[in-house]
Image (cartoon, helix red, strand yellow):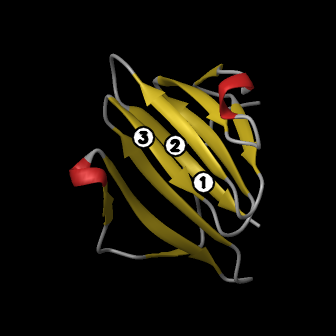
Amino acid sequence: MSITEHIDGIAVTTKASVYFDGKCVSHGIQFADGTRKSVGVILPAALTFSTGAPEIMEGVSGSCRVRLQGSDVQAAEWKTYGAGESFAVPGNARFDIEVSDEPYHYICHYG
């Protein structure tokens, strides 16, 4: 997968969504056809997110470790993702994400 570097024809929400005391900051974008995405950064931290809709997280730079939460969190497997890689999270789910050394920049594709 190639890294998305530029997105044309969008509307950007200029006020950032700030989560976890500033450890995750993102901006919403919307395409003319109604498709929504967000672009953001996660600073070094260990965080847990909940989803409403299914999401695909695309790494732009940096890396992270991710564990999808299921019925048995202890048995859930950690996987590492870097720039140019993506992972899918089901709707109405939770996932843990750890960013260690450098910020993880991402694009979140909804739906």
Could you say which is closer to the camera, residue 43 or residue 67? Answer: 67
Please tell me whether mark 2 sits on a helix, a strand or a loop.
strand
Residue contact between numbered discs 1 and 3, judged by CB atoms under 8 Å: no
51 horizontally vs 53: left or right: left
Residue lying at 45% horizontally and 38% vertically, measured from the top left? 105
Could you say which is closer to the camera, residue 9 or residue 86? Answer: 86
Residue tagged 2: 106
Residue 64 location (% of width, % of height): 51, 25
Residues at marks 2 and 3, CA–CA distance in whole angstroms: 15 Å
The label number, if any, that marks residue 108 in the structure image:
1
Q: How crowded is mark 2: few (under 14 residues within 10 Å), some or many (20 or more)?
A: many
The count of marks equals 3
Residues at marks 1 and 3, CA–CA distance in whole angstroms: 16 Å
Residue 80 location (% of width, % of height): 62, 19
Q: Residues within 10 Å of mark 3 (few under 14, many from 20)?
A: some
Task: Compare marks 2 and 3 and give the one earlier in the sequence.
Answer: 3
Residue 43 location (% of width, % of height): 31, 35
Name the amino acid type tagged 1: Cys
37 horizontally vs 49: left or right: right
18 horizontally vs 13: left or right: left
The label number, if any, that marks residue 47 in the structure image:
3
37 in relation to 56, above or below: below
Residue contact between numbered discs 2 and 1, judged by CB atoms under 8 Å: yes
Please tell me whether mark 1 sits on a helix, a strand or a loop.
strand
Task: Compare marks 1 and 3 and give the one earlier in the sequence.
Answer: 3
Please tell me whether mark 3 sits on a helix, a strand or a loop.
strand
Residue lying at 67% horizontally and 34% vertically, measured from the top left? 73
42 in relation to 34, above or below: above
The label number, if any, that marks residue 43 in the structure image:
none
Residue 102, picture quadrant: top left
Name the amino acid type tagged 3: Leu
Q: Which of marks 1 and 3 is in front?
A: 3
